[in-house]
Image (spheres, grey):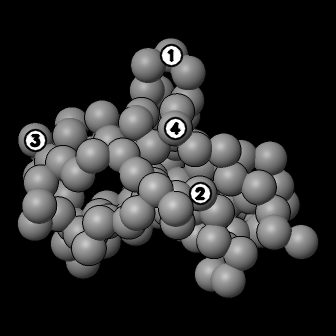
Amino acid sequence: MPVSRHHAGFCPLCFSVISTAPALESWVSRTYTALPAPGLPLPEARRIQIENRWRPALMSDSGFSAWVWRQGDLACFIVADMVSESDVERFKDYFVRVRTATEPVRAY
């Protein structure tokens, strides 16, 4: 279900950042969440350089992939059911759109 612009941004009730970035495919399921997690370690072997600006970790399990990165003292996650090689390339593009369009902040 599309999110209205009125609700775009940080949701203090669930600590989720709601993205208004255009969908990649109507059938792709994805979630972007930011949680307080100061010092969360990221597995170096899973980190991928994207556009010479970011190095999120790409995690995959049970038919889902997730970008994981730290932004300040928040841990950010984009989870999607995109696991094939072509999906991962589109998922990178989605990461860039979300990462450049949002700036999560702590609600408390």
Residue lying at the far top of the rendered structure: 52
Tag 4: amino acid: Ala
Separation (CA) of disc 3 from disc 2: 29 Å
Residue lying at the far bottom of the rendered structure: 13
Dot 1 corresponds to which residue? Answer: 52
Point 52% across, 66% down: residue: 7
Tag 3: amino acid: Ser
Q: Earlier in the sequence, mark 4 or mark 1?
A: 1
Separation (CA) of disc 2 from disc 4: 10 Å
Mark 2, mark 1: which one is toward the viewer?
2
Question: In the shown orientation, is residue 2 left or right of residue 99?
Answer: left
Q: In the rendered structure, are the residues bearing label 2 and label 4 in contact, judged by CB atoms less than 8 Å apart?
A: no
Residue 11, percent from left and from top: 63, 71
Tag 2: amino acid: Gly
Position above or below: 89 against 31: above
Q: In the rendered structure, are the residues bearing label 4 and label 1 in contact, judged by CB atoms less than 8 Å apart?
A: no
Q: Earlier in the sequence, mark 3 or mark 2?
A: 2
Point 68% across, 83% down: residue: 13
Question: In the shown orientation, is residue 24 left or right of residue 11?
Answer: left
Residue 86's tag is 3
Separation (CA) of disc 3 from disc 4: 23 Å
Look at the numbered disc 3 and give the secondary structure of its residue.
helix
Question: In the shown orientation, is residue 26 left or right of residue 37?
Answer: left
**Structural crowding at the residue carrying mark 2, measured as other residues with C-alpha within 10 Å and reported as few (<14), some (14–19) or many (≥20):** some
**Structural crowding at the residue carrying mark 1, measured as other residues with C-alpha within 10 Å and reported as few (<14), some (14–19) or many (≥20):** few
Dot 4 corresponds to which residue? Answer: 101
Position above or below: 42 against 52: below
Q: Is residue 24 visible?
A: yes
Tag 1: amino acid: Asn
Residue 107, percent from left and from top: 81, 69
